[in-house]
Amino acid sequence: MSVRNEITVTARRGAIEEAAESAWLVAAAEESEMGSRPMPTIGNALEGAPGVLVQQSTYGQVSPFLRGLTGYHVLNLVDG
């Protein structure tokens, strides 16, 4: 028997001001911060974010761990 819990995260512009009021761990990066350093992969973009460990697996490939969950359990969406 397996139980599968699904969580849907929805973002909207202007929500960053409300992040401090949230009971959940919320992190956001400004566009200027993201553009100020080279980021060839989403793993590189996540480096330094709270609750994120980025492991270099092979050259040019990284594996992000978000709050202890591996990439198999995390869906990364990029709107760029």
Image (spheres, grey):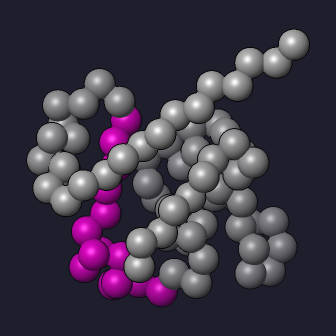
Residue 36 position, x and y percent, is 33, 84
In the depicted structure, whether residue 80 falls above or below residue 77: below
Residue 9 seen in this snapshot: yes
In the depicted structure, whether residue 67 falls above or below residue 35: above
In the depicted structure, whether residue 51 falls above or below residue 59: above
* 69, 37: nearer the viewer: 69
The residue that appears at 82% across and 18% down in the rendered structure is 2
Magenta stretch mostly in which secondary structure? loop
Residue 27 position, x and y percent, is 34, 49
Whether residue 1 sits left or right of residue 50 in the image: it is right
Q: Is residue 30 magenta?
A: yes
* 8, 36: nearer the viewer: 8
- Quarter that holds the C terminus: bottom left
The residue that appears at 75% across and 74% down in the rendered structure is 61
Magenta stretch bounds: 25-38
Residue 75 position, x and y percent, is 60, 52
Q: Quadrant of residue 20?
A: top left
The residue that appears at 37% across and 35% down in the rendered structure is 25
Residue 53 seen in this snapshot: no
- Quarter that holds the N terminus: top right
